[in-house]
Image: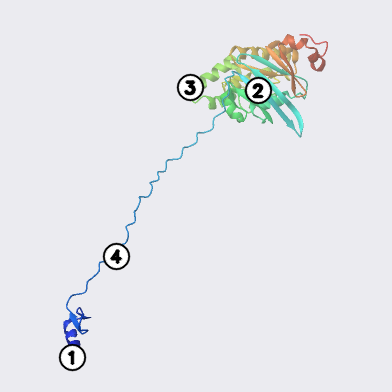
Amino acid sequence: MSDDSIHGAGESLGSDWLLTPQVGDGAPRVDARPPVELAPETPPQVERRAAPVVIELPKATPEPRKPQLVAKESGLVVKNLGKQYSKRPVVRNVSLSLQRGEAVGLLGPNGAGKTTCFYMITGLVPPDYGSIYMDGTDITNLPMYRRARLGIGYLPQEASIFRGLTVEQNIMAVLEVSEPDADKRRASCDELMAEFSITHLAQSPAIALSGGERRRAEIARALAGRPAFILLDEPLAGIDPIAIAEVRDLVKHLKNRNIGVLITDHNVRETLDVIDRAYIIHDGTVLMEGSPSDIVNNVEVRRVYLGEKFSL
């Protein structure tokens, strides 16, 4: 067979027929077997692991900060208070305590630091160091209005009554905050005016009151806030002898209401007559603490404050 015939036969058989050499005679012959198709190579199997499931828990909401609680200690307690102005120490490590139904004096010469102590206890000025507790709760950093709501009242030395209002309006102004019920406000106002014998002055303008009447109205207004403790700064200052006797009776009345009273005043004899005990403060520090008789008989107190001839 010629090469051309073989070539023609190959074309007629199609492209799927291959020419392969024949073993033995060296002549090519047509192989009628179709080409073997190899299966594609299977890629190696990769083990797939499930992605870890992350569960996000809700973040805990921090609780609001509460006043710090310490070991239960009843009453109003001051520990190691200190204050300085322009690098000059005014109060240094003053400690004192006051219980309900007790009258305590904070006495001493001018510039001793008494009023500054009052300001720190009520929250008017912050202490540089030290702590203030009320029934075991640390109130050192609480603002004044928070202390008032907890039960700390304050009657400053200067006239604090609202002069443009009547006596009744002065008391109702505080009751508007402390008593939400209108009927109870009205009843409380009437009771306070009767208690301090100022009912007949209910519609009188506050500016027209005498010294004793003004003090009674101010104390009635202070009690409208329902304090457990009240601080009286110079309650006997600038009033006549008759009014002084009235204020002394008012202090006793507050004690009978189980209210703790802290008093500072320059009328030493009258103050010692109404208090249960006193702290003598000198040069910013507590010189001594004791009953009125202990105070009067103390040699150091006589030397720096009372004088040798003082007697009750």
Q: Name the kind of residue labelled 4 in the image.
A: Glu
Decide: is 167 above or below 27: above
Q: Is the C-beta separation of discs 4 and 1 under 8 Å?
A: no
Q: Is the C-beta separation of discs 2 and 1 under 8 Å?
A: no
> What residue sits right under mark 3 in the picture?
183
Q: Quick one: SS at disc 1? A: loop
The picture places residue 287, in percent across and down from the top left corner, at: 75, 18
> What residue sits right under mark 2 in the picture?
78
Q: Name the kind of residue labelled 1 in the image.
A: Ser
Mark 4 vs mark 3: which is more N-terminal? 4
Mark nearest the camera among 1 and 3 is: 1
The residue located at (63%, 25%) in the rendering is: 132
The residue closer to the viewer here, 18 or 306, is: 18
The picture places residue 29, in percent across and down from the top left corner, at: 19, 82
Q: Quick one: SS at disc 4? A: loop
Q: Quick one: SS at disc 2? A: strand
Badge 2, how many Cα within 10 Å: few under 14, some, many 20+?
A: many
Please indicate whether residue 150 sits to the left or right of residue 104 in the image: left
> What residue sits right under mark 1 in the picture?
2
Q: Quick one: SS at disc 3? A: helix
Q: Spatial distance from mark 4 to mark 1, Cα to Cα?
A: 42 Å
Mark 2 vs mark 3: which is more N-terminal? 2
Q: Residue 38's quadrant in the figure?
A: bottom left
Mark 2 vs mark 1: which is more N-terminal? 1
> What residue sits right under mark 4 in the picture?
41
Q: Name the kind of residue labelled 2 in the image.
A: Val
The picture places residue 130, in percent across and down from the top left corner, at: 67, 27
Please indicate whether residue 266 sits to the left or right of residue 2 in the image: right
